[in-house]
Image (cartoon, rainbow, N blue to C red):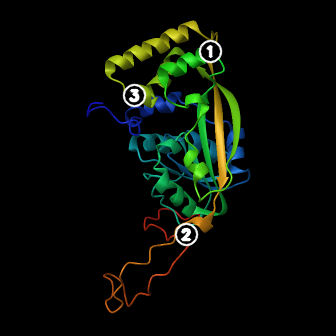
Amino acid sequence: MSPATPSPATSFGPVADAYDRARPSYPVEAVTWLTGGGRAHVVDLGAGTGKLTEVLHRSGHHVLATEPLLPMLVRLGRRVPVPYAAATAEAIPVRSRSVDVVTCGQSFHWFDAERALPEIARVLRPGGVLALAWNTYDTSIPWVRRLKRILDPASDRDGALPTRALLESPYFGFVEEKQFRFWQTHTARSLGELARSVSHVATMSERDRERALAEVASLYDGYGRGHDGMQLPWVTRCFRAVVRHQDLPPEPTDAPVDHDVDPPGLDGPQPPPTERRPPEDPGMQLIDFR
């Protein structure tokens, strides 16, 4: 990969427009299952251009969307009238125990799970839920298998998704799973934009990318095309788990403190540090759901 080539994690910025136009949304039934129904305070991590955020908002939830890539965040702001922040899953800008549900639509695999999972647990209320969702190609159909081999040959290999970190995490309990199937209509142009929005394609050399896009165009001409365009089948794979606060690490208390000297900017002596579960907020509050 040359220095000018974006990494997979940052490759979506330059293709944010194509991503916004061509990527599928999420079935309402899947979002209802993920959130448990009823109104909830939700933080949507790695929200991209707001595909999942939009369905959460329409479903009546109070949503804060976070996304580290500014080109994606700009489009999210245009799409959905909710608070949003340029932030990562490893440093969530909300108070401890203030959120009912944390959602990750098509984003959990980009996180540093060792840092993100305790941070997600920190912001969840007792009984709160971490909910993950991926829109995956329905490879039970032969031409869809061919499309996947062109666009994303390494993803979802053998049906596995990167949920092992959650399954092994001490901060969350039993992981439930459910699948939802839906169809997305594509024209030749929108299928090409879908291809451009995939990180595997976005990080190719220009020559390889043009070859892949030509294969996608050829596939559109030869498979599944009706009078109203191509019907591309998807399977939304959903996972949810309840937080376990008792296993969060305590706040560090071994730093030396001189109680005879007031810390800069504070009025009067400060009390010695105390152990807390979960740790205190990271000093970057943006929104308080309470």
Q: Which residue lies under the disc numbered 2?
A: 278
- Residue at 41%, 78% (x, y): give it: 254
Q: Is residue 29 left or right of residue 135?
A: right
**Mark 2 crowd level (few <14, some 14–19, many ≥20, 10 Å Cα):** many
Q: Is residue 5 above or below residue 162?
A: above
Position in image of residue 26 (x %, y %): 63, 36
Q: Which residue lies under the disc numbered 3?
A: 202
Q: Is residue 230 left or right of residue 262?
A: right
* Among numbered discs 2 and 3, the one appearing first in the sequence: 3
**Mark 3 crowd level (few <14, some 14–19, many ≥20, 10 Å Cα):** many
Amino acid at the residue labelled 1: Pro
The N terminus - image quarter:
top left
Position in image of residue 173 (x %, y %): 66, 56
Q: Is residue 174 above or below residue 110?
A: below
Query: What secondary structure is found at the residue carrying circle 1?
Result: helix
- Residue at 59%, 59% (x, y): give it: 170
Q: Which mark is residue 142?
A: 1
Query: What secondary structure is found at the residue carrying circle 2?
Result: loop
**Splitting the image into 4 quarters, where does residue 220 fall?**
top right
Please tell me whether mark 2 or mark 3 is closer to you in this view. Answer: 2
Amino acid at the residue labelled 2: Pro
* Among numbered discs 3 and 1, the one appearing first in the sequence: 1
* Among numbered discs 1 and 2, the one appearing first in the sequence: 1
